[in-house]
Image: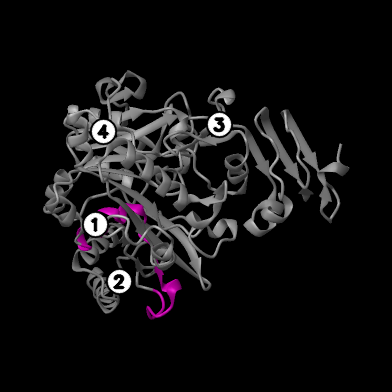
Amino acid sequence: MSFAHLSFAHLPFEEIEKSISARMKAAGLHAIVLDDFLAKVRRVHAGETGLIDFAEIKDLKREEIFDLHTIPSVDINDADMKGMLEKTVIIKLNGGLGTSMGLAGPKTLLPVRDGMNFLDIILKQLQILRKKSGANIPLLFMNSFNTDEATRKHKGIAKLNGDVPSTFVQNRVPRLDATTLLPIGDGTDGEDWCPPGHGDIFPALQVSGLLDQLLSRGIRYAFLSNGDNLGATFHPGILAEFVRRDLQFLSEVTPKTAADIKGGVLFRHAKTGRIQLLETAQVPPANKMDFENTQRFADFNINNLWIDLIALKERMSEGPLDLSLIVNPKETRGTKVLQLECAMGAGIGQFARTGVVRVPRSRFAPVKNCSDLLVRRSDACMIDDDGALVLHPDRKGEEPVVVLDDNYKKIDDFEHLVPVVPSLLKCRRLSVKGAVIFDVPADIEGDVALENPLPTAVSITRLG
């Protein structure tokens, strides 16, 4: 759907505002969340599409980006380091259901490795960090209204941080009719609502009272990352550099590969002079090739963020964060709708003292589909001493490329077709077309293409 031709001038904003306000107030949403959402709706009503003018995109300054390998090593038990750790919180995004993989519950409850799911591995990482440092670093999960109950029931979550809550819930906002900007339905159906993107983490921390609670306990620094990125472990060296440089917001990036051309990138805004995040949904069609050009945008944002909570509190006291708008077209019950979203990485544009750290690929190990899951479960990966899921040293930092067709798209089908995980330690690329059952141990080496043209599944032993 294109929004360039849409005009909402025939429907006064006051009428839209009244309808949205009634819907959100009836649902018990906080006034701060309402004001934040209405600000986004007002921008769309005025004709904003969320697309970025590429004439405003400038390169980052050399002093704003540094490499992780240039950071001095730190002793986690050093007195200064321990003081920083005692002021730190780890926050994981945990709102995804993994519906594209056929999951009905939180993606983080999906078994990943050695019988452990994402939550188990994250909890193990925290246990290791607390033991090594002697610091009782709190861990928070930002759940959605779809994932909250199941997450809170998971073993080890409830009493994770003593009397500090271990979970808080992302807000929800109305889906809007694409032609009127009015909320769809009557608000009683879950389909009438949508998550506002993970940029909602900032108002969610504020309205839940957690931001003030953390600050009152002397916690100043936050490390944020995606719950499905098991490479995103806490890094004391990055924290120390963040503090040394007196930054308010720091984003991690890693070099792009062919698989990452659609990943969000950071740039300097020509008008504001600040670093901003550019997501693929904000790229005009005419600039798609520019955005995917790895010569111009060599690195992409991996959503590992470091934030000064004092600076966040001060900025939010001034009003809603002006995060880059993402207008996401959908169709719900036959009605074309708009979901207004924002990304938490866009928060970097709200602060004066910001930076970018280039990190190795090992800090980006997500599971977006069953092809990713096969790699994570295979011997091409391992869990290191910090509990991070990383590539085996023999891989030399290069992840095997796995392309499974739609026979493996849903998790139930994947589990049926891959009862025995093949060895991918020496694999460069594996592609599978058709339903092939991995029912015996198999060593996949180099480039391998498997194909089953039959309508029924066949054992890998019958190919060859």
Going from N to C along the chain, the mark reached first, 1 or 3, is 1
Classify mark 2: helix, strand or loop.
loop
Going from N to C along the chain, the mark reached first, 2 or 3, is 2
Q: CA distance from mark 1 to mark 2?
A: 34 Å
Give the amino acid at mark 3.
Ala
Going from N to C along the chain, the mark reached first, 2 or 4, is 2
Classify mark 4: helix, strand or loop.
helix
Residue 205's disc is: 1
Q: Are marks 1 and 3 in contact (CB under 8 Å)?
A: no
Residue 11's disc is: 2
Please identify, in this view, whether the residue under mark 4 or under mark 1 is nearer the observer. 4
Instruction: Residue at 35%, 34% (x, y): give it.
Output: 252
Instruction: Residue at 30%, 22% (x, y): give it.
Output: 73
Q: Which residue is mark 3?
A: 258
Q: Are marks 4 and 1 in contact (CB under 8 Å)?
A: no
Q: CA distance from mark 1 to mark 3?
A: 36 Å
Q: Quadrant of the C terminus?
A: top right
Going from N to C along the chain, the mark reached first, 3 or 4, is 4
- Label 3 packing within 10 angstroms: few (<14), some (14-19), many (20+): few
Instruction: Residue at 35%, 53% (x, y): give it.
Output: 198
Figure check: 65 above or below 379: above
Q: Which residues are magenta?
A: 184-208
Please identify, in this view, whether the residue under mark 2 or under mark 4 is nearer the observer. 4
Residue 145's disc is: none
